Image (cartoon, rainbow, N blue to C red):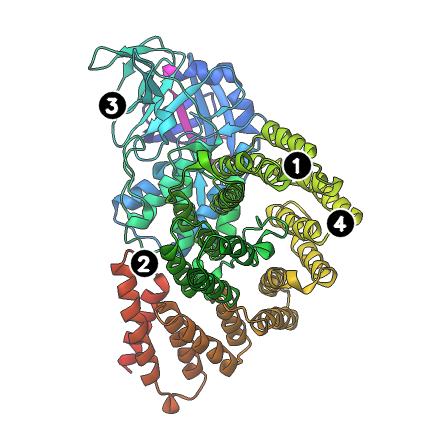
């Protein structure tokens, strides 16, 4: 340790030691000429070669981001390497957590947004900078309430020939522990025990083990016998997705106040803890912390977009078609699938059996058209029980789950079907292919693109002449960053006689996966100019919407361009497509209202959104999303009677959903606050809150998530009872 008063490089006077990290000792110092505090890090002997050989000084000194410290200098003195960085006031989150500090969900969302933005910036450098050691101790909370990501001395450019691997138990992903291989070739994650509060660094510049109380360094090709006398090799396999896991784990700790388990063991999902956070935040953290890198956010930019749009991830904000993954015409076509399939079944069943079976499926179809998914699924389940060997009801059921956005349940219903696929008739093979296709659609909804591609391939196996299966598979592969595979399936689709418009449409999806927004936009414009085929145009409009959503922060006026595109789509296509397009357009109007520069402009967009949502109701389609948005808009516009009517209809359709009563309670509370104190009557608020709380507690007992809105509402009602 250096003594107080030591002067380095004739410029920096050491004030005191302030800690140590995986890469060395850290000191608070004074810049003598500028008379300002700085942080100096003395790089450990074993890390000097890493810094010197990789030109990391130049890489880090050029960084400039509001949530990163500025790197001022790198210098060598007495054969020691030092880095000099901006001094960041505040405390790191490890210190705050040790003090028992609790953090509000809204703050964690804001910090997650800031940190994912930092990672997108770092990963976007050339070469990419992978931090490799994101954890609460390396995240500062400034006096202004913002975060700052610190300690870059185990960061490297991704394209360097040599590599370095570090891990901190609880925060590092499995791949940062390396892999172990036994004599039989079986590979598993290296599960060596490390210190809970230290960063282990595995470096290819060491020929053996050097250990102190804070850091352990291993050679990347170092082979060590395990307890069974077999060998394993430490092998770093790190990329940007490793940082994404670590950020998720750090936020997990801030939410639960408990360090997550080591990644090579089982990590308790955030949703299994009573964390008191929204479904959207649970989704982001759990996706970031997937063991398999392919299942995480594939870029920090996508994680950042998820934080920015977190409200849309919560169940009450998600519409049935929000993923923009609907195949051209497939949802509309599936509305009549039951009639076609039951016509085939008529030849095989007795008339009375057919009539009962067909009636259940037709009932399910009608309920589904009305947005009554629960009742529709129950009708389909009854049909399945009548004829478990018939695939017709399964097709309708899986389609309902897909439109309901209950993708996992749709997939589960396909997987539970027991059928001899080696001895199928031509008719049954076509139905089985349709089910595999729907499973692919569900996997797309879950963003499990590799599994979606597998399902589309199965559909192709049983119905090889259907070109749309090939194009859909190409899109899934493109979104899984397999551009070569996507191009191959596009070539196969060409052999099936797809049109030029379909070719350009698929190419647009492929280039979109590479974030070539302008090229993708040009291809979609070409598709829309060259064809009058309604189905192709419909899907082209959906892809265009996806371009503007994915490129929201890259394309100038992206949201307004999305509005214009959807307005054109609604006016161009016939009414059979209007339901889906209207809901998307209503959502865009709603978003524009929230960004409007003045109240008049906001009110105009709210009115336009309201007209669209009400038009959806007039067409007989009712779901939670539509009714909830009608209520929210009317409440925002202080049209309380209309808001009340929408919420009462929600209660009528969803009598067991606590959120309907919760929103109505909040509405009545706002209404009461608008009148004079002596005339207020809070009795109805207590009545509806008690109903909401009863259903909410049942939801929790059945494994539901904690809803902070209910907690806030409970505190409000308690305060009102004291009045």
The reply to whether the C-beta atoms of the residues labelled 4 and 2 are less than 8 Å apart is: no
Q: CA distance from mark 3 to mark 2?
A: 40 Å
Q: CA distance from mark 4 to mark 1?
A: 17 Å
Q: Quadrant location of the C terminus? A: bottom left
**577 left or right of 316?**
right
Residue behind mark 4: 528
**432 left or right of 41?**
right
Residue behind mark 2: 706
**206 left or right of 444?**
left
The reply to whether the C-beta atoms of the residues labelled 1 and 2 are less than 8 Å apart is: no
Mark 1 packing: few (<14 Cα in 10 Å), some, or many (20+)?
A: many
Residue behind mark 3: 213
Q: Residue furthest right?
A: 530
User: Which label's residue is closer to the chain start, 3 or 2?
Assistant: 3
Mark 4 packing: few (<14 Cα in 10 Å), some, or many (20+)?
A: some
In x, y percent, where is residue 101?
A: 29, 50
**Residue 222 lies in quadrant:** top left
Mark 2 packing: few (<14 Cα in 10 Å), some, or many (20+)?
A: many
Q: Residue furthest bottom?
A: 679
């Amino acid at each position: 340790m250096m003594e107080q008063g030591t002067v380095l490089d004739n410029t920096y006077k050491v004030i005191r030691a302030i800690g140590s990290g995986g890469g060395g000792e850290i000191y608070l110092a004074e810049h003598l000429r500028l008379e300002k505090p700085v942080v100096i890090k003395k790089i450990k002997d074993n890390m000097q070669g890493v810094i010197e050989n990789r030109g990391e000084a130049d890489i880090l000194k050029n960084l400039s981001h509001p949530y990163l410290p500025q790197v001022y200098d790198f210098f060598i003195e007495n054969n020691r390497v030092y880095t000099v960085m901006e001094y960041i006031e505040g405390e790191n989150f490890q210190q705050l957590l040790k003090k028992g500090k609790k953090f509000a969900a809204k703050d964690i969302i804001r910090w997650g947004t800031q940190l994912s933005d930092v990672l997108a910036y770092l990963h976007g450098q050339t070469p990419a900078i992978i931090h490799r050691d994101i954890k609460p101790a390396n995240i500062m909370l400034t006096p202004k309430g913002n975060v700052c990501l610190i300690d870059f001395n185990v960061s490297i450019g991704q394209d360097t020939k040599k590599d370095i691997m570090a891990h901190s138990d609880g925060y590092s992903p499995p791949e940062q522990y390396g892999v172990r291989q036994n004599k039989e070739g079986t590979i598993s994650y290296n599960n060596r025990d490390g210190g809970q509060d230290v960063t282990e660094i595995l470096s290819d510049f060491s020929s053996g083990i050097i250990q102190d109380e804070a850091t352990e360094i291993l050679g990347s090709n170092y082979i060590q016998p395990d307890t069974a006398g077999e060998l394993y090799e430490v092998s770093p396999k790190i990329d940007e997705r490793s940082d994404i896991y670590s950020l998720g784990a750090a936020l997990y700790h801030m939410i639960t106040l408990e360090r997550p388990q080591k990644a090579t063991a089982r990590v308790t999902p955030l949703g299994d803890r009573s964390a008191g956070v929204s479904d959207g935040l649970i989704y982001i953290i759990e996706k970031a912390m997937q063991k398999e890198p392919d299942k995480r956010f594939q870029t920090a930019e996508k994680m950042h977009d998820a934080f920015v749009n977190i409200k849309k991830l919560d169940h009450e904000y998600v519409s049935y078609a929000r993923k923009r993954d609907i195949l051209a015409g497939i949802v509309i076509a599936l509305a009549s699938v039951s009639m076609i399939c039951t016509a085939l079944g008529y030849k095989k069943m007795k008339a009375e059996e057919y009539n009962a079976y067909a009636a259940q499926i037709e009932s399910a179809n009608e309920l589904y058209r009305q947005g009554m998914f629960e009742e529709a699924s129950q009708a389909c389940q009854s049909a399945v029980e009548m004829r478990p060997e018939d695939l017709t009801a399964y097709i309708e059921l899986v389609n309902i789950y897909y439109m309901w956005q209950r993708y996992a349940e749709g997939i589960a219903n396909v997987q539970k079907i027991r059928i001899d696929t080696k001895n199928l008739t031509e008719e049954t093979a076509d139905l089985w292919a349709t089910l595999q296709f729907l499973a692919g659609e569900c996997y797309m909804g879950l963003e499990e693109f590799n599994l979606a591609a597998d399902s589309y391939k199965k559909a192709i196996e049983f119905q090889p002449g259907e070109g749309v299966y090939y194009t859909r598979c190409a899109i899934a592969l493109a979104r899984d960053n397999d551009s070569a595979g996507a191009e191959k399936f596009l070539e196969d689709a060409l052999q099936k006689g797809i049109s030029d418009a379909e070719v350009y449409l698929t190419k647009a999806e492929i280039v979109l996966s590479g974030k070539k927004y302008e090229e993708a936009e040009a291809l979609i414009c070409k598709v829309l100019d060259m064809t009058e085929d309604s189905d192709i145009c419909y899907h082209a409009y959906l892809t265009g919407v996806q371009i503007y959503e994915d490129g929201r922060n890259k394309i100038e006026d992206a949201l307004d361009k999305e509005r214009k595109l959807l307005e054109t789509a609604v006016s161009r296509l016939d009414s059979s497509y209007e339901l889906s397009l209207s809901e998307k357009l209503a959502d865009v109007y709603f978003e524009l209202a929230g960004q409007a520069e003045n109240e008049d402009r906001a009110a105009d967009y709210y009115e336009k959104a309201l007209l669209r949502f009400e038009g959806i109701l007039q067409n007989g389609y009712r779901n939670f999303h539509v009714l909830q948005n009608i209520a929210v808009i009317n409440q925002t516009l202080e049209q309380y009677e209309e808001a009340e009517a929408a919420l009462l209809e929600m209660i009528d359709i969803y009598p067991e959903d606590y959120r309907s009563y919760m929103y109505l309670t909040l509405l009545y509370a706002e209404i009461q606050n608008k009148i004079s104190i002596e005339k207020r009557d809070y009795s109805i608020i207590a009545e509806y809150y008690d109903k909401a709380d009863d259903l909410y507690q049942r939801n929790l007992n059945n494994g539901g998530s904690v809803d902070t809105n209910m907690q806030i509402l409970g505190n409000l009602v308690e305060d009102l009872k004291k009045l």
